[in-house]
Image: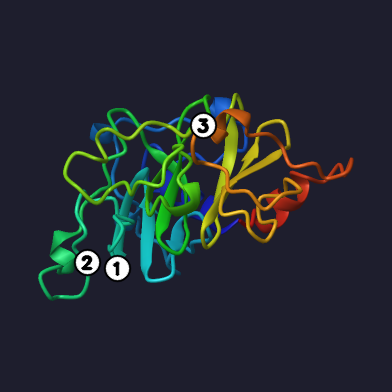
Amino acid sequence: ACAAAACAAAADAGVAGCTLVSDPAERTRAAPSERRALSEVDASPPPCVDEGVVARGQSHACVLVDGAVRCHGSNSYGQLGIDSTTNVGSGLGGAMSALTDVDLGAGRYAVQISAGSYHTCALLNGAAGEVLCWGSGSAGRLGYDSSANIGDVPGSMAALTPVNLNGAVAVEVACGSDHTCVRTSTGGVRCWGYGDYGNLGIDATANIGLGGTMAILTDIDFQGAAATAAAAAAGGLRG
């Protein structure tokens, strides 16, 4: 509701490209040349934000402003998405003046973000419902069938490809401490990463996201519950 209010305020002020909808086929963003930052909107009181606009990890945080993602804080694993492990915001070689947009790839904009302990994910614009993740790859939490970190060395973000959701179209992404979940356009929920405590909902403690396991990613069995998506939409999907 807060994000919708901020978008309404942006539209009233003539800021193009702010669209918050649940149907991924309707997600559109204006071209960068046609957009102004939401910070330019003169609103009183200031527009509020909710989860998915600001994402907080264990020791880093990211903000989503009109499709662009900027992160600051600890960066030991590349969770800031800036192709290095330099912390940002400490003032010790990593001042806020170094803050820059995460490279999501040409033509890509984020419509929602989430942060785990040491990783970050973004839901992209477009009907495909694609998700990008970066930071620590431990236990397969990034969804790339590898434990390698992403975002910690030059060029790694430019080479980033969407997570293999095994045919699903994501409408929401949520990062847990060391695992990740998406809500899909058909009302399902799919999770990957650390599974030792049943986090992934697959009746097993195996990790998913390593060694080809993303190809068998499937919806959690909620035993016929019809509210798999409704509950997530109402309160925000929790990874």
Task: Indicate left or right for 167 with 147 as reference.
Answer: right
90, above or below 169, in the image: below
Query: To which residue does mark 3 refer?
Result: 212
Element class at badge 3 = loop
User: Quick one: label 1 or label 2, which is nearer the N terminus?
Assistant: 1
Residue lying farthest right? 224
Q: Position of residue 18 (x, y in %)?
A: 44, 41
**Residue drawn 31% across the image and 38% down it:** 104
Q: CA distance from mark 3 to mark 2?
A: 32 Å
125, above or below 52, in the image: above
User: Quick one: label 1 or label 3, which is nearer the N terminus?
Assistant: 1
Q: Which amino acid is tagged 3? A: Gly
Task: Indicate left or right for 78 with 236 as reference.
Answer: left
**Residue drawn 50% across the image and 54% down it:** 52
User: Which image quarter is the N terminus in?
Assistant: bottom right
Q: Which amino acid is tagged 1? A: Ser
**Residue drawn 66% across the image and 32% down it:** 185
**Residue drawn 53% across the image and 61% down it:** 50
Query: To which residue does mark 1 refer?
Result: 74
Numbered label attached to residue 87: 2
Which one is in front in this view, the residue at disc 3 or the one at disc 2?
Answer: 3
Looking at the picture, tell me which residue is in the foreground, 195 or 153: 195
CB atoms of marks 1 and 2 within 8 Å: yes
Instruction: State whether residue 204 appears in this view.
Output: yes
Q: Position of residue 94 (x, y in %)?
A: 15, 67
